[in-house]
Image (spheres, rainbow, N blue to C red):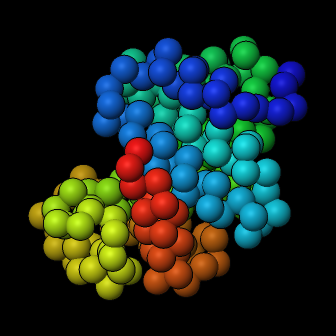
């Protein structure tokens, strides 16, 4: 079993399994949010970042939530000897897997997953993208049901609640982290 996970190794595995730029971009966004939160909870930024990169590892190949994602990814991560806390966090990010979120890393993965995608969607419709984005502007978009309609608004708030972080603070953390890597 691996005790340390390198970012390059996680990236290479993601690229092996995931061909689309949009899903890779999502993985990097979730990684970014995970790395931003790791110090707050005394977590290892490398482990947390790799967890974010790999959480949707199998989604492109096996998108069916009843029989596919994240089951194949979990098996691959286990077979490659990834740390059990990473594997468990990936399992817990999908409510339908029935794995309760118990650790800060598990809760953070759930909290930043949908939110990072939503924030990026907001950035796409802004002239300045992520730069200058505020929690207030994101909350306006949250109130528009037709905008990024597939995003579960309840899960956005539930993630912050599970982390025990004020929603505006959670938005600001994710926005700031993503803005810091906007060129990627």
Left or right placement of residue 70 versus residue 129 in this view: right
Quarter of the image with the C terminus in it: top left
- Which residue is at the front of the view, 136 or 85? 136
Q: Residue at x 23, y 67 (%)?
A: 128
Left or right placement of residue 7 versus residue 59 in this view: right
Q: Residue at x 71, y 39 (%)?
A: 86
Q: Residue at x 50, y 15 (%)?
A: 16
Expressed as whole percent of the image width and height from the top left, the position of residue 123 reads: 27, 62
Choose top left, top right, bottom left or bottom right for residue 152: bottom left
- Which residue is at the front of the view, 155 or 130? 130
Expressed as whole percent of the image width and height from the top left, the position of residue 58 reads: 47, 24
Choose top left, top right, bottom left or bottom right for residue 144: bottom left
Expressed as whole percent of the image width and height from the top left, the position of residue 124 reads: 21, 57
Left or right placement of residue 23 versus residue 87 in this view: left
Choose top left, top right, bottom left or bottom right for residue 91: top right
Could you tell me how many numbered marks the image carries?
0
Residue 114 visible somewhere in the drawing: no
Q: Residue at x 72, y 21 (%)?
A: 78
Expressed as whole percent of the image width and height from the top left, the position of residue 107 reads: 64, 59
Quarter of the image with the N terminus in it: top right
Task: Indicate whether 183 appears above or below 64.
Answer: below
């Amino acid at each position: 079993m691996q005790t340390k996970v390198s970012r390059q190794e996680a990236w290479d595995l993601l690229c092996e399994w995931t061909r689309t730029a949009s899903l890779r971009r999502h993985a990097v966004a979730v990684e970014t949010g995970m790395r931003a939160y790791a110090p707050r909870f005394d977590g290892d930024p490398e482990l947390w970042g790799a967890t974010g990169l790999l959480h949707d590892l199998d989604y492109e190949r096996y998108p069916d939530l009843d029989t596919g994602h994240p089951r194949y990814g979990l098996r691959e991560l286990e077979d490659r000897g990834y740390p059990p806390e990473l594997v468990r966090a990936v399992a817990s990010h999908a409510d339908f897997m029935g794995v309760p979120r118990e650790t800060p890393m598990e809760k953070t993965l759930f909290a930043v997953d949908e939110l990072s995608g939503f924030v990026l969607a907001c950035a796409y419709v802004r002239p300045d993208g992520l730069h200058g984005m505020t929690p207030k502007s994101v909350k306006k978009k949250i109130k528009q049901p037709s905008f990024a309609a597939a995003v579960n608004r309840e899960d956005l708030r539930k993630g912050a609640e599970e982390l025990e972080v004020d929603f505006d603070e959670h938005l600001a953390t994710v926005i700031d982290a993503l803005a810091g890597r906007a060129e990627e």
